Image (spheres, helix red, strand yellow):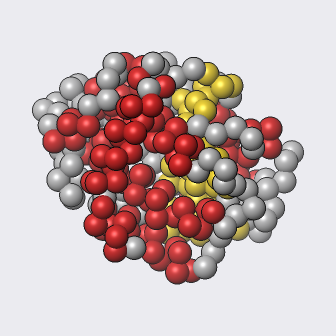
């Protein structure tokens, strides 16, 4: 088993689902895991569970609400002020089947799954650049193939039903793939590499907003959280991927993403739009 001693992993949504499975495995291998989650009350029991299974586990909690750009900025600032390192940022947290808007008035799925993680990544990049070798891992989805074009305007057109929200989920996952590619281009020649991936259709808490009984039915055909964590663990830790950047992975192997995910115009459009959307937060950091 590869030792991760001396490395720090910042994992969003690490108190449930594949994020929790990822945190467990990183800690088991000796990594220092920062669990970045909305609820401290729900995260502390998970940390205690990890500590019971992995005596001496190195864990930290940080408060992070990806549905609020102010909260994202506060989280990043607090962590940077702590002086602690980051070797790998795993943008794992996400949601599906939700309707409504974020605290900033953005459509909730795209706002939470892309805009929040985009800002967090930008704010933490200075710390990542200080690492001997750093990685940014975006947990995307095979669902991105369902979107034939980048449509940033969807963020202003919230879904009217849970069923209609799946198009927004697919769009947000396309954005995750394009974000990893844009980062790879911007960080070319640095010690920071990027990855996006499909974890499998996982029976995780990402589906918590899908109405019952549909939630129960779709979970019958899904893989476990531990199985779903394998691909992001490989992207986060495998030494053989250290020279790769901007690639997309599925079932622990590199795969070709959708045609629009390979379009440099879509990549650059998303990057410019995302920066404009979070401009005031980047300027105040």
Q: Evaluate whether residue 200 shows in this view.
A: yes
Quarter of the view holding residue 184: top right
- On screen, residue 85 above or below 200: below
On the rendered image, what quadrant is the C terminus found in?
Answer: bottom left
Residue in the image at 73% along x and 56% along y:
133
Q: How far across and down, in percent of the image, does residue 236 sit?
A: 67, 46
Q: Quarter of the image holding residue 167?
A: top left
Q: Is residue 213 left or right of residue 182?
A: left
Q: Nearer the viewer, residue 53 or 156?
A: 156
Give the quarter of the image for residue 166. Answer: top left
Quadrant where the N terminus sits is top right
User: Residue, x 21% and y 26% (percent of image)?
Assistant: 164
Residue drawn at x 84%, y 53% is 3
Q: Position of residue 155 (x, y in %)?
A: 22, 41
Q: 154 left or right of 23?
A: left
**Can you say whether 16 is above or below 87 in the image?**
above
Q: Nearer the viewer, residue 54 or 241?
A: 241
- What residue is shown at x 77% (from left), y 68% (from top)? 56
**Count of numbered marks:** 0
Q: Position of residue 260 (x, y in %)?
A: 41, 23
Q: Position of residue 152 (x, y in %)?
A: 26, 37
Residue 23 seen in the figure? no
Q: Is residue 174 above or below residue 270?
A: above
**Left or right of 96, for residue 231:** right
Q: Observer-nearest residue: 5 or 114?
A: 114
Closest to the observer, 57 or 74: 74
């Amino acid at each position: 088993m590869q030792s991760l001693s001396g490395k720090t992993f910042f994992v969003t949504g690490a108190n449930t689902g594949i994020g929790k499975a990822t945190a467990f495995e990183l800690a088991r291998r000796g990594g220092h895991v920062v669990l970045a989650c909305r609820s401290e009350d729900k995260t502390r029991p998970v940390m205690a569970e990890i500590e019971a299974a992995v005596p001496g586990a190195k864990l930290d909690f940080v408060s992070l609400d990806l549905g609020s750009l102010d909260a994202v900025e506060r989280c990043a600032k607090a962590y940077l002020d702590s002086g602690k390192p980051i070797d790998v940022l795993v943008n794992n947290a996400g949601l599906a089947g939700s309707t409504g808007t974020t605290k900033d008035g953005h459509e909730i799925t795209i706002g939470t799954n892309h805009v929040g993680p985009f800002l967090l990544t930008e704010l933490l990049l200075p710390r990542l650049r200080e690492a001997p070798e750093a990685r940014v891992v975006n947990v995307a989805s095979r669902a991105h193939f369902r979107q034939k074009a980048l449509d940033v305007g969807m963020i202003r057109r919230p879904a009217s039903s849970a069923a209609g929200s799946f198009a927004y989920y697919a769009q947000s996952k396309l954005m995750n793939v394009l974000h990893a590619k844009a980062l790879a281009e911007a960080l070319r020649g640095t010690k920071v590499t990027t990855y996006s991936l499909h974890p499998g259709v996982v029976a995780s808490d990402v589906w918590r907003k899908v109405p019952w009984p549909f939630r129960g039915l779709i979970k019958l055909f899904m893989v476990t959280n531990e199985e779903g964590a394998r691909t992001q663990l490989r992207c986060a830790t495998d030494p053989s991927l250290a020279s790769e950047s901007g690639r997309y992975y599925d079932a622990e192997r590199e795969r070709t993403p959708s045609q629009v995910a390979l379009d440099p115009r879509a990549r650059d459009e998303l990057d410019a739009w995302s920066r404009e959307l979070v401009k005031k937060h980047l300027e105040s950091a």
